[in-house]
Amino acid sequence: MTLHWLLGYKIKEGRAEAFVAYLKSKSFKRLRGQLLRETGIKIIATYFTVEPSSSEIHDYDAWDLWEVPNYAAIDRYVASKARDRFIRSYLIPYVGSSYKWITVQKQDFAE
């Protein structure tokens, strides 16, 4: 069963421009490839909040949509080098500690 994770986060003050550049970089593409090879997990896209509202989605500056092929992939993710690299090169420099994981089912998405 495929799961979808949403990772919502606040971008560190003054780091938004550098973060967008990182998302377009070869380094980030390599990280996505490493994550897919080691775990089977795919980062589908990054979405940015444009207009604030009262919904939980808008509590964060951006959201990543991850596709997780099965529960075993979560175990592989926890033990992977890709996870360590993700934390070092993605979360620490741009996000810090203000993030939240949400698991959603495919039917939660509008077709």
Image: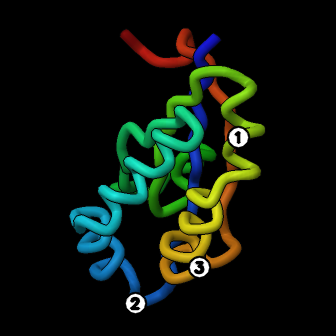
Dot 3, crowdedness within 10 Å: few (<14), some or many (≥20)?
few
Q: What element carries label 3?
A: helix
| Identity, as a three-letter code, of the amino acid under mark 3 | Ile
Q: Which of marks 2 and 3 is nearer the N terminus?
A: 2
Q: Distance between the Cα atoms at labels 1 and 3?
A: 21 Å
Q: Distance between the Cα atoms at labels 2 and 1?
A: 33 Å
Q: Which residue is drawn at 74% across and 27% down?
A: 72
In the displayed structure, 73 sits above or below 20; it is: above
According to the image, label 3 marks what residue? 92
Q: Which of marks 2 and 1 is nearer the N terminus?
A: 2
| Identity, as a three-letter code, of the amino acid under mark 1 | Arg
Q: How is the image coloured?
A: rainbow
Task: Answer with left or right where residue 55 lies relative to residue 97.
Answer: left
According to the image, label 1 marks what residue? 76
User: Which label was assigned to residue 14?
Assistant: 2
Give whichever of 108, 3 is nearer the camera: 3
Question: How far across and down, in percent of the image, does residue 49 sit?
Answer: 40, 55
